[in-house]
Image (cartoon, rainbow, N blue to C red):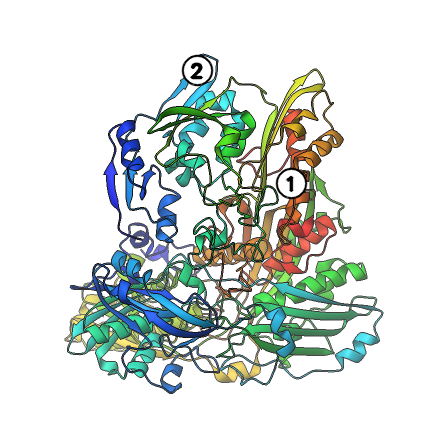
Amino acid sequence: MINFGYTRAATIGEAIQAVAGDPQARFIAGGTNLVDLMKYGVERPGRLVDITRLPLKHMEDTPGGGLKIGALVPNSDLAYDARVERDYPLLSSAILAGASAQLRNAATTGGNLLQRTRCYYFYDAAAPCNKREPGSGCSAIGGVTRVHAILGASSSCIATHPSDMCVALAALGATVHVEGPDGARTVAFEDFHRLPGDAPEKDNTLAHGEMVTAIELPAPRFGSNHSYLKLRDRLSYAFALVSVAAAVELDGDRIAEARVALGGVAHKPWRVPEAEALLKGETPSPDAFGKAADRLLEGAVGQGENDFKIELARRAVIRALSQAAAGTPQVQSNKIVN
Amino acid sequence: MSNVHPYVGRAEPRVDGALKVTGRAKYAAEFRADDMVYAAAVPATIAKGRIVALDLSRALSAPGVLDILTHENRPEIPESDEPYLNDMVAVPGSPFRPLKDDRIVYGGQAIALVIADTHENARHAASLVAAEYEAETPVVDVAAARGEAYDTFEPRDGIPPPPPPRGDAEAAFEGSAIRLRHDYRVAPEHHNPMEMMATTVVWEGEGRLTIHTKTQGVINPKNYICAVFGLDPDKVIVNSPFVGGAFGMALRPHYDLMLATMAALKLERSVRLVLTRAQMYTMGWRPDTLQTVALSASADGALTSISHHAVQATSRYEDYQEPTVNWSGLLYDCPNVSLKYELAKIDTATPSDMRAPGATLGVYALEAAMDELSYELGIDPLELRLKNYAERDGNDDKPFSSKELKAAYAQGAERFGWSKRSPEPRSMRDGKELVGLGMATGCWEAMMQPHSASATLSADGRLEVACGTADIGTGTYTILSQIAADEFGLDIGDVTARVGDTTLPMAPVEGGSWGAASAGNAVRAACKALKEDLLKHARGLDGSPLSNAAIDHVAFANGRIALGSDESQSVSFADAVRASGQAAVSAKADFAPDEDFSKKFAAYTHSAVFAEVKVDEELGVIRVTRVVSAIAAGKILNLATARSQILGGVVMGIGMALHEETLWDKRLGRVVNANLGEYHVPAHADIQNIDVIFVEEDDKANPLGVKGLGEIGIVGAAAAIANAVFHATGRRVRDLPITIEKLL
């Protein structure tokens, strides 16, 4: 680990100023990913600006009936918050599908959005990686690709975004509140993360010095018609090979609205409105879900070792939508897939 | 207190448990010395080739850096292989030595050692060492090298080569109506103990060193270091009281030991080197192995032939071997057996023993093939094993010293509910999940090694027993304390066991499951010798009530030596010790396996493993919901620590069946998942009900009747699970681990 400067910010403005004015500075909150990456020599910040004492730890109801979650709310507190369990159980479930209890205690809401990929080659400082070292090349292509992207990848990068929570936030249509040197703004969740294109070093659309201050959820919908289904290499504490956040709103026996987002398959949570639109007015059925899955996976390409993810994702989408439509969401503490 | 005896045979809590959970048990990286400095190893970023140039300038100017050792500037080390072969677990070949020259023979090989004032500064400076290489293309999978497989290697000491063929397996195979031949592969694995390899060398002055290093036997690093650096054995102590898991990886000296010692000798000060988790994948591993098993049988299920062929990876520089195929010659009664074992060289570090080396792989392949045969025959898998039950070891044509495998089958099947299994694959369901029940047999050799031990009784009534063996987390401290407490009728709290120090009576490395039988019997013998001495002193007391008593006529209990015929006639331990004129009475004894016995009998432990899996077929999700492991391993000294060993073995078997795989990038020649996040060992959620049964087994190979059980728990476990997956799904996956895509 390199030597680095450390300051603790007293106000949001002070934190933003400290980072914005120093290209080598980074915010640190829970540090569950950043500190690891520093030990691996992947992240080499000159200065860390500690934001853990900023007043961003509260949750508040919004006038529109939604919920605004401070960026420093720990993942565990968020998952077990009574309002979240009642109104946004999909979010609670997705958080509990990820990491371990200890990590969730330390990790923050804002930090969860900013997790970096778990691509093996990104972590291997001796291997070329466009995300770590722009222009150096992609070692993953042609290498061990079993865990890599099947959607939205580029010839520069086939990494995936590792978060579970973000998949649920994408499905729920969250909004990200951001503050930076030029003031505050909001970003629709689907516009927060980006595809790698020819600039995979940029995971998201934040400018240097901008800070996530809150996540806002719209008014609750979907009741118990949701599910977060995560498939992985062991039953706990592994990143998703494929995960699905699904939610449906039923009108009688027909689907009024559906939401489906995929994790583990792309550089960002993968959501295709056209695929969701296909379900409008349909009766829940494997066939209808299959058509939506096909649309969601349109253009999916494997790298060889991860070709199976395309079929696995299709099956997982059908299952998760079935669970959602039946009102029997996947339970995270019990590993039986219902 | 006599009502607590015997301790042996009970579920006695670990005597070192409190030390461990309170952090007072010291591991190799926790010893400190005044003025100690810290080292960090720099890994090569190529897997094959040579170092053309090293640039140390940035690293040398980094804060706190004291020195950097490389192949260019290191102190003189011996050229010949001879000194490095002072490793009782060495294998044929030329042992690896770090910083030898400019050659890179595997990915991650240490190319430099940075020494600095703090661990952090050393780590940072290590990242600043720049190397220029001339790289060659590495080969890191055995499949790519199998064309050059060979069996002309010099046999490894202690590892029997496959026995010569018996009968004519090929002809019997061709002549049998029921036959099958399949290829099996098990992915390469690493041991992944919690504790990293680490060495703290304490510079004691005047050429004296105390070395704390992670090891499965202190004598091995001592012999090695003294030979390599030409040190006087009287001036070197190796001390390693606690080991945080090893599973075989700490049998041989690794590069942390040599580099830390080299640095200490050069700087003439204390040095600590702790390897990183990633560097734990730059040494011994369970070798990548390709196997072919052919079985044939008559229609009634009697085996007519067994052929088993394995090609196993080894390094370029050594011929590592393990007994992979031999099990197929002794597990079943079969007249025609052909076994073949070959090596293939690849560009990795030399593989190493890993929990039940050879058996874990070979018995998996045999037991998977036996399962396949049972379906071909339409015979219940357990029935097929019983039909071909071996009463003699067919490899050596000897009877077994004891073999209660039939009882293990019966008790395991009963506990598991095997009779409720419907034979057809895909015939059992629970909700959306397919249910599968599978079983397999396990086998491991019951070995012993010469060990010495001492026993010392002080006037205050405390007993200390000592042996230079290791407790690698298995419970050695506890069982030695139990044995000694029983011998003297003492409360276990009045007994101290000491292991892991070269000043203690001699023991070899702790491996092969021989620790309990060997160290246990040595401690027992030392206690018996001490009792004789004490009685002699007690008899010599003025007016001793024991003046004419022979050892067979007295009992040691309640802190006294008493006549068996009249308990009121006794001498206290304290008086007996005082009569010696010393503060304590000490005796030493040697234990060695009975060679006549082992000439007459084959000694093995056995297991019957039953597994239930539930499979979501559509999504490829497998849950191992129940395992019953019934073990026949002689006398069980401690039901709690023994059960833990079997549980650990089964968990590791679940990992082998479903999760574990070391992934090398074939172009870079490096392990890409060198961490516990991406190398998947089972998590708690993967482990449900594991039930352990110890069947009664009376064995006469040693006085305690102990066979050892550190390894038997893993053997057969993966096969039972893979067989259960077939029963659930009708899909036979012949390459482990069975990951999701293999069931889609």
Q: Is residue A320 at least partly visible in the picture?
A: yes
Q: Using the image as rendered, state which of residue B626 and residue B319 is in the foreground.
A: B319
Neighbours of disc 1 within 10 Å: few (<14), some (14-19), many (20+): many
Task: Residue A92: give x, y in percent of width and height.
Answer: 49, 29
Question: Is B561 positioned to the left or the right of B330 in the image?
Answer: left
Q: Position of residue A273 (x, y in %)?
A: 63, 28
Looking at the rendered structure, the kind of residue marked 1 is Ala
Where is mark 1, residue-wise? A313
For residue B263, what is the image quadrant? bottom left
Q: Residues within 10 Å of mark 2 (few under 14, many from 20)?
A: few
Q: Earlier in the sequence, mark 2 or mark 1?
A: 2
Q: Quadrant of residue A15?
A: top left
User: Image point 45% across, 43% down: which residue?
Assistant: A116
Q: Which of the chains bears the disc numbered 1? A: A
Residue type, label 2: Thr
Real-space Cα separation, disc 2 to disc 1, in angstroms: 35 Å
**Is B675 situated above or below A34?**
below
Position of A276 relative to B350 (above/below): above
Left or right for B552, reference B159: left
A200, above or below B674, in the image? above
Taking the view exactly as shown, the residue that stands out farthest to the top is A63
Q: Is disc 1 on the same chain as disc 2?
A: yes
Please report the residue visible at 73 percent of the width from the left and 44 percent of the height from the top.
B428
Q: Nearer the viewer, residue B305 or B106?
A: B106
Q: Do we see residue B539 in this rendering?
A: no
Name the residue beneath numbered marker 2. A62
| Side of B420 where B544 appears, left or right | left
Counting labels gives 2
Numbered disc 2: secondary structure: loop
